[in-house]
Amino acid sequence: MLYDLARPFIFALDPETAHELAFANLERAHALGLTRLLRPHVAPDPVEAMGLTFPNPVGLAAGLDKNAAHIDALADFGFGFVEVGTVTPRPQPGNPAPRLFRLPAARALINRMGFNNEGLDRFVANVQASRSRGILLGLNIGKNADTPIDRAVDDYLTGLRRVYPLLLDRPGYVAVNISSPNTKDLRSLQLGAELVTLLGGLRSERNKLADRHGRRVPLAVKIAPDLDDEYLPRLADALAANEIDAVIATNTTVARESVAGLPHAQEAGGLSGAPLAARSTEVVRLLARRLKGAVPVIGVGGIMSGEDAVAKITAGAALVQLYTGIVYRGPQLVGECRRAILRHRRPAA
């Protein structure tokens, strides 16, 4: 594939520079109609989840398109859904650079981006301007770094109110990111009273918005892989009790055992890619076992091949998402995962 030839040149660049250059070239290709050539030729494989019909079970995880500026071009990759963000109420630069590191020997990344984004005003405008009305969107919301953790709910409610109307005339869901390790104290929102307060606030506000607009937009919550196994059933129960429509498992990990000794391994931030695969899949399995289909699980973390995607589905995921695998494998990974899942679900296909 062309991406295999281009990757050495891409990897010779600083990771953030490469990211920006890749999107600039992607937009040029889209303007010329060339990105349509990326669409994989795979039979339809619709999935019903969250009250929505996903054209296929393979999506893009949040983080790649933080400002929702490239929805139309990314839609041509053949995803069943595209999640954009994380967006915060106000623009913020994120953490100081360097803040993104490749670990090629492990097929991994470490990032401490810190929710760098242009804020809700730009995000909303970009979603409204996108022309790919049929692509199912996930709109991922977070809190500003300088918002005190005891006021975090305010930021999430602001985000929910602003993005909710974007999904009244197009299919999609709102994802709530409470699991990034790169915003101080954010992960505490996954625990105890803080979780109950946040979920209760989201449920109440979503009910008000549904009454006002006449449409119930699904909510998903993204969790960390570093939660204790003993706590996961309690978390699952809290999600179900608060009418959350899906759980995204998982975000990046702060664990480093699997990459110890590699260059950049001790950089602060979240580790993603192949080393995360086993733990992420185990979290999917534990959640799916507890939830028994009442709340679907979206499996993300370490999907570098079609076999990895099938492992998430086998563990109980209804849908899967890609990110670091796209960095290492390119757009071809989307079609590979779709084909592998289709063969798994329909052996005679």
Image (cartoon, rainbow, N blue to C red):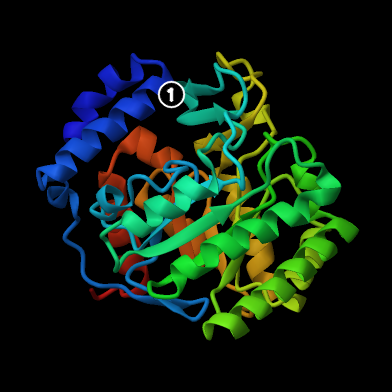
Which percent across, then down, holds residue 21? 30, 26
Tell me if I can see residue 191 in this picture: yes
Q: Which residue is mark 1?
A: 16
15 or 318: which is nearer to us?
Answer: 15
Image quarter (top left, top right, bottom left or bottom right) of the C terminus? bottom left
Residue occupying image coordinates x 20% and y 64%: 42
**For numbered disc 1, what is the local secondary structure?**
helix
Which residue shows up at 38% across the image and 50% down it? 126
Rendered view: 141 above or below 302: below
Look at 25% across and 48% down and name the residue there: 73
- Counting every numbered tag in the picture gives 1
Among the 4 quarters of the image, the one containing residue 157: bottom right
The picture places residue 125, in percent across and down from the top left corner, at 41, 52
Q: Quadrant of the N terminus?
A: top left
From this view, report whether residue 281 is shown above or below residue 100. Answer: below
Residue 304: percent from left, percent from top: 41, 43
Type of amino acid under label 1: Glu
User: Is residue 297 or residue 173 the one in the foreground?
Assistant: 173
Q: Quadrant of residue 161?
A: bottom right
Q: Is 210 left, or right, of 122 in this rendering?
A: right
| Rendered view: 120 above or below 93 | below
Question: Observer-nearest residue: 92 or 216?
Answer: 92
In the image as oriented, which residue stretches furthest toward the right? 193
Residue name at image x 27 percent, y 32 percent: 24
Q: Position of residue 207 (x, y in %)?
A: 67, 80
- Disc 1: CA contacts within 10 A as few (<14), some (14-19) or many (>=20): some
Quarter-of-image position of residue 169: bottom left
Position of residue 285 relative to residue 115, above or below, is: below
